[in-house]
Image (tube, rainbow, N blue to C red):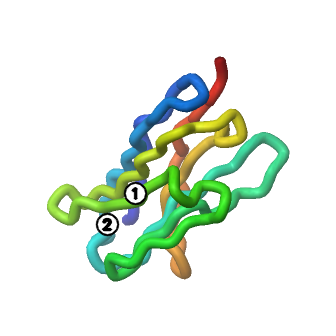
Amino acid sequence: QVQLVESGGGLVQPGGSLRLSCAASGIRVSISAMGWYRQAPGDERELVARISNDVTDYADAVKGRFTISRDNAKNTVYLQMNSLKPEDTAVYFCNGVGVWWAWGQGTQVTVSS
């Protein structure tokens, strides 16, 4: 059974940084296309970053500020978020790209002064 557990969210001031983690079990992140998604209240869930075969891609809204990476030994995917803006406030989830598993509970990121 696949399990994805997100962590690392919190309250941060505009301009601050956070690093999110996604610990996976039941799959190998080293051979899976993985992505970070976010969902703000009233909005649809959107893909903000993905990694596949060590190639990364980002939504325009986060390009240059967010970095997705993975640690194959720990079977974990990360999202380093810098220069955070209030509009980055959302619940962040990780999951596959193209193939999806059960969604985890996500981790809340709130950017506010």
Neighbour tally class for label 2: few under 14, some 14-19, many 20 plus, Cα within 10 Å: few
> On the picture, is 103 further left or further right than 68?
right
Q: Residue at x 69, y 49 (%)?
A: 39
Along the viewing direction, whichever of 61 and 99 lies nearer the viewer: 61
Which residue is most to the right?
42
Residue at numbered disc 2: 26
Which residue is most to the left?
73
Q: Position of residue 1 (x, y in %)?
A: 37, 65
Mark 2 falls on what kind of element? loop
Q: Residue at x 49, y 57 (%)?
A: 94
Along the viewing direction, whichever of 72 and 2 lies nearer the viewer: 72
Q: What's under tag 1, amino acid-wise? A: Gln
Q: Which mark is residue 3?
A: 1
Q: Residue at x 62, y 30 (%)?
A: 110
Residues at circles 2 and 1 in contact by the CB criterion of under 8 Å? yes
Task: Work out how far the residue at label 2 is from the one at label 1, CA to CA, in angstroms.
Answer: 6 Å
Q: Residue at x 73, y 44 (%)?
A: 40
Q: Which of marks 1 and 2 precedes in the sequence?
A: 1
Q: What's under tag 2, amino acid-wise? A: Gly
Using the image, determine if residue 73 lies above or below residue 38: below
> On the picture, is 84 further left or further right than 7?
right
Along the viewing direction, whichever of 52 and 24 lies nearer the viewer: 52
Neighbour tally class for label 1: few under 14, some 14-19, many 20 plus, Cα within 10 Å: some
Q: Position of residue 5 (x, y in %)?
A: 41, 48
Q: Position of residue 61 (x, y in %)?
A: 66, 56
> On the picture, is 68 further left or further right than 65?
left
Mark 1 falls on what kind of element? strand
